[in-house]
Image (tube, helix red, strand yellow):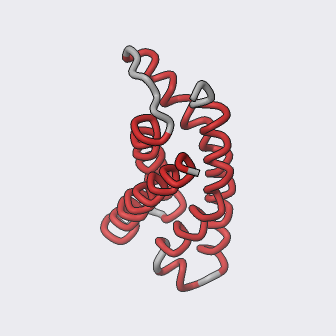
Amino acid sequence: MRQFALFCIAGGLAFFVDAGVLHLLVRGLSVDPYLARLVSFMAAVTTTWLFNRRFTFLSGSGGPGSLLREWGRYVVSQLGGFTVNYAVYALLVWVIALVRQWPVLGVGAGSAAGLVVNYLLARRYVFKHQ
């Protein structure tokens, strides 16, 4: 339960990164909301990797090559949850005018939908030695 609670805290941090980058790109720079979400996802997934390796799964430090490999495995593992997350986001942006106007609402719904998938993949694939 401790790991899952910390994973949820990382997810909360990532939500703010994801939503903040998305808001900046869409509202500040007029970037397409679908493309902007891909950029905001990469910022958010890197945030959760850093938090989770340090606090949630207590991953040991390695050399630069091992860190890059671990980050790559983490990004790949999070693609499962992101698929669910992005599908919910895209559907809501497409169907609901309020979400089109405020895409952050779609980020929240998508994040909740992908949470369990992301946790299980991170725990069993990236940080399985813990």
Q: Position of residue 76 (x, y in %)?
A: 61, 35
Q: Residue at x 49, y 72 (%)?
A: 103
Q: Quadrant of residue 129?
A: top right
Q: Residue at x 62, y 48 (%)?
A: 118
| Label total for image | 0
Q: Position of residue 40 (x, y in %)?
A: 44, 54
Q: Position of residue 93 (x, y in %)?
A: 59, 73
> Residue reaching furthest front?
1
Residue 62, placed above or below residue 33:
above
Along the line of sight, the residue nearer the viewer: 4 or 46: 4
> Residue reaching furthest bottom?
98
Residue 49, placed above or below residue 12:
above
Query: Is residue 6 toward the left or the right of residue 91 in the image?
Result: left
Q: Residue at x 62, y 51 (%)?
A: 82
Query: Is residue 84 toward the left or the right of residue 15 in the image?
Result: right
Along the line of sight, the residue nearer the viewer: 30 or 39: 39
Q: Position of residue 43 (x, y in %)?
A: 41, 48
Along the line of sight, the residue nearer the viewer: 58 or 33: 58
User: The C terminus appears in which quarter of the rendering?
Assistant: top right
Q: Residue at x 41, y 40 (%)?
A: 55
